[in-house]
Amino acid sequence: MPDGRVLRRVAGEPALILGAPRALLMQVAHPCIAAAVADHSDFRDGPWLRLWRTLDAMVLLVFGSEPQRCQALAAVRRTHDRVQGRLRGDGGPWRGGTAYTAHDPDAQAWVLLTLADTSETIFDRLVRRFHPGEREALWADWRALGQFFGIPPRLLPERYSGYRARLQQTLDSDLLAVTDTTRALARAILHPKVAFLPRAMWQPAVSLTAGLLPARLRVAYDLPFGARQRLECAIWTGAQRTTWRLVPRARRSLPRLYASARLSIRPALLAAPR
């Protein structure tokens, strides 16, 4: 079984936080996931709290000790136990009234694929190019994490090439569809409600997200990517790469430090009602 070293190295980069909007937009392009998020979370009204909870769980799953990982997994499963319902309208191949559940293995596999692809894309674009063999090792680590989470091995290709093929197959299929629910979530993702920040402050981050998204989804979300957006994306990319070169890795790996002190600092957070 992979030891997770490559995943921890990649996930330890704070730059990956900039990939959160990309990953979320890819995930909610799946109509069942969009419905689950819209019906069973406070995401639209409290995106920052939701992001904190998600990052908290992911940090422990990737960096935590075995007891921490098990506790995080149990918390996620308790939340998922409450997430079930029916689609309110048509979306992709699903008709209105179709039942959904957060325990659906295909939806869980898609979420994992988006996280794996986003971590690879952000690290490659904003930090540094991968060394030979690192991409294969990174996918092996993500696959092991998915199996720990309970996703059936048949849904997680064994090799990196199979994972890339499955990702592209899903992107090219009709399984993804931008519905009215998805668009409402996208507005909350790209322009979260923060009282002390004007809407215009988010535009450079929106340009970065547009540049990082797969082309099909960028078009589906109607995100402009002209000269201004390309320039803003290039500035973000250059600034992040410069930061990586100038700041020692020990000072950048905040998730590692956070995970080591997680239970002693905030012991009740994962057990708190969602």
Image: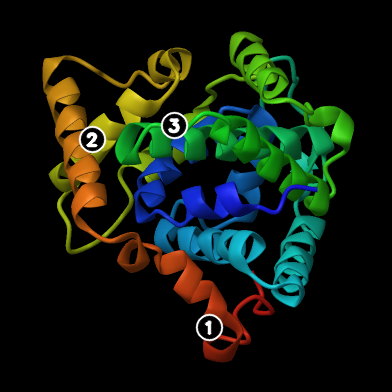
Question: Which secondary structure lies at badge 2?
Answer: helix
The answer to whether residue 129 is left or right of residue 69 is left
Task: Report the residue at 59% width, 80% height from top.
Answer: 269
Task: Report the residue at 56% width, 63% height from top.
Answer: 59
Residue under pointer 1? 261
The answer to whether residue 124 is left or right of residue 211 is right
| Residue 121 image label | 3
Q: Amino acid at mark 2?
A: Thr
Q: Earlier in the sequence, mark 3 or mark 2?
A: 3
Task: Report the residue at 52% width, 88% height from top.
Answer: 265
Q: CA distance from mark 2 to mark 1?
A: 31 Å
Q: Nearer the viewer, residue 103 or 12?
A: 12
| Residue reaching furthest to the front | 132
Q: Amino acid at mark 1?
A: Ala
Q: Amino acid at mark 3?
A: Thr
Classify residue 142 by image quadrant.
Answer: top right
Give percent across and percent down for residue 77.
79, 60
Give percent across and percent down for residue 79.
73, 62
Task: Report the residue at 18% width, 36% height from top.
Answer: 238
Question: Which secondary structure lies at badge 1?
Answer: helix
Question: Does residue 164 sit above or below 272 in this rendering?
Answer: above
Q: CA distance from mark 3 to mark 1?
A: 29 Å
Residue under pointer 2? 237
Q: Earlier in the sequence, mark 2 or mark 1?
A: 2
